[in-house]
Image: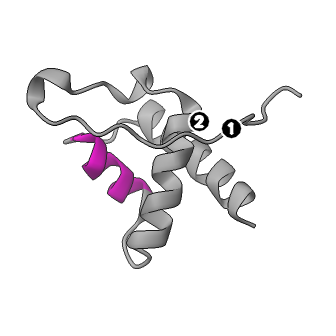
Amino acid sequence: MPGTIAEVVPFRECVDAIGTRAADEIALPELVGLARVVLRDTPLEDPVVGMARVIGLGRLHADIRARLEEALQKARETMA
């Protein structure tokens, strides 16, 4: 079914700056996994900002914010 997430996978954090990935290089199921962790572990923080912090983003551009919000919405759907 188009637009659905077949699976949620754990987010792979980078251990150093060399391994840092751009947000648009991270698969949506992995971003959904990250969103689920952020929702569970930091409920008072803006989840999109929390996700960006974990990824290592300094600034949130509109296209990246939209992608993280999409992952966040799908995470909420899979947690319900």
Q: Against 17, is 46 above or below?
A: below
Horizontal placement of 72 versus 37: left or right? Answer: right
The structure residue drawn at horizontal position 75% and vertical position 67%, both measured from the top left corner, is 80
User: Can you tell which of label 1 and label 2 is closer to the viewer?
Assistant: 1
* Residue in the foreground of this view, choosing between 32 and 23: 32
Give the residues drawn in magenta, as a range: 48-57
Q: Against 34, is 23 above or below?
A: above
Crowding near pointer 2: few (<14 within 10 Å), some, many (20+)?
many
Q: Is residue 52 magenta?
A: yes
The amino acid beneath tag 1 is: Glu
Residue 26: x, y in percent? 44, 27
Residue situated furthest right in the rendering: 1
The amino acid beneath tag 2 is: Pro
- Are the two marked residues, 1 and 2, in contact with CB atoms closer than 8 angstroms? yes
Residue 28: x, y in percent? 56, 32
Q: Is residue 75 magenta?
A: no
Quadrant (top left, top right, bottom left, bottom right) of the N terminus: top right
Image label count: 2
Determine which residue is flagged by label 1. Answer: 7
Determine which residue is flagged by label 2. Answer: 29
Q: Against 51, is 16 above or below?
A: above
Horizontal placement of 23 versus 15: left or right? Answer: right
Horizontal placement of 5 versus 44: left or right? Answer: right
